[in-house]
Each structure stands twice: as C-alpha cells, then as structure tokens.
Image (cartoon, rainbow, N blue to C red):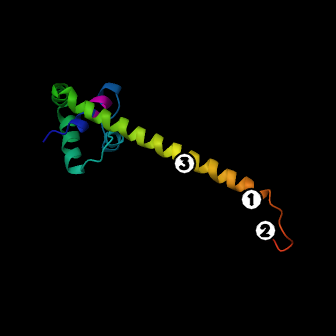
C-alpha cells in the first residue's frame, strides 16, 4: 500500500529537517490523497523513519517524474488562464475608456 507521492513528500520534509506532520505532508503534495493512505505512512515514518526513507529511495524515478509533469501541466494551465484574464482586462479597460469619452446628458443617460 505504498503511495509514491506521499513517500516523496515525507522524504523531502525529512531531508529539509522539518517535522513530519499531516499538514506538512499534505502541503507538499500536488494531488489530493485520502487520509486513510496518508496517516499510516506518517505513523510508519514516526515509528521507523530509516525504513520508510529507505523505501522511498527504492521508488522508481518515473513515479516522481509523473508528479513533476503534473505540476508542469498545472503551471501551463494557470499561465494560460492568466493570459486570458489579462486580455479580458485590457478589453474591458478599452471599453471603459471608450465609454467615458462620450458626453453624459443632464439625466445621466448617454446620448
């Protein structure tokens, strides 16, 4: 019942000298995981850290690379969203600037 991303997160926190807590491990993960998978691995680490870290080193690098690709894909998607929003803002600014150059009538209705 090994979960490579959880093991990688625990291993990274261990290398950084940080406490292995549920919150810390979840913060390192790029995907959601069930607590039923997370809690036993944290408990296992706390009881025998050297064995869990050794298990992590045995994980194939491809499982960690999949996480990196997922992160790259997420960044690309977010960059696309930001670009679309920037374009929308520029268009709205242009409309707003164009609308404010029209004179208002006495009743506040544009002529």
Q: For mark 1, does the 10 Å Cα neighbourhood hold few (<14), some (14 to 19), or many (20 or more) residues?
A: few
Chain-order first, disc 2 or disc 1: 1
User: What is the magenta range?
Assistant: 9-13
**Above or below 25: residue 12:** above
Residue identified by numbered label 3: 85
Q: For mark 2, does the 10 Å Cα neighbourhood hold few (<14), some (14 to 19), or many (20 or more) residues?
A: few
Closer to us: mark 3 or mark 2? 2
Can you name the residue that lies furthest to the right here? 106
Task: Please tell me which residue is depicted at 25% across the width and 38% down the height of the picture.
Answer: 6
The reply to whether discs 1 and 3 touch (Cβ–Cβ < 8 Å) is no
Residue identified by numbered label 2: 110
Q: Tell me the tag on residue 60.
A: none
In space, the residues marked 1 and 3 are separated at their CA atoms by 21 Å
In the rendered image, residue 101, in percent from the top left (x then y), is placed at 80, 56
Chain-order first, disc 3 or disc 2: 3
Q: Picture quarter containing residue 18?
A: top left
Q: Tell me the tag on residue 99.
A: 1
Can you name the residue that lies furthest to the front here? 111
Q: For mark 3, does the 10 Å Cα neighbourhood hold few (<14), some (14 to 19), or many (20 or more) residues?
A: few
Count of labels shown? Answer: 3
Secondary structure under tag 3 reads: helix
Q: Main secondary structure of the magenta part?
A: helix
Secondary structure under tag 1 reads: helix
Secondary structure under tag 2 reads: loop
In the rendered image, residue 3, in percent from the top left (x then y), is placed at 19, 39
Q: Nearer the viewer, residue 43 or 52?
A: 52
In the rendered image, residue 84, in percent from the top left (x then y), is placed at 52, 47
Answer with left or right where residue 81 lies relative to residue 87: left
**Above or below 82: residue 9:** above
The reply to whether discs 2 and 1 touch (Cβ–Cβ < 8 Å) is yes
In space, the residues marked 3 and 2 are separated at their CA atoms by 28 Å
């Amino acid at each position: 019942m090994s979960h490579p991303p959880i093991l990688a997160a625990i291993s990274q926190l261990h290398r950084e000298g940080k406490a292995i807590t549920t919150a810390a491990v979840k913060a390192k993960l790029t995907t959601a995981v069930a607590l039923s998978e997370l809690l036993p691995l944290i408990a296992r680490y706390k009881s025998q850290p050297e064995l869990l870290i050794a298990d992590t080193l045995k994980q194939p690098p491809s499982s960690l690379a999949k996480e990196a690709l997922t992160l790259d894909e997420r960044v690309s998607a977010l960059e696309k969203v930001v670009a679309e929003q920037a374009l929308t803002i520029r268009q709205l600014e242009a409309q707003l600037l164009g609308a404010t150059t029209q004179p208002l009538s006495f009743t506040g209705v544009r002529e």
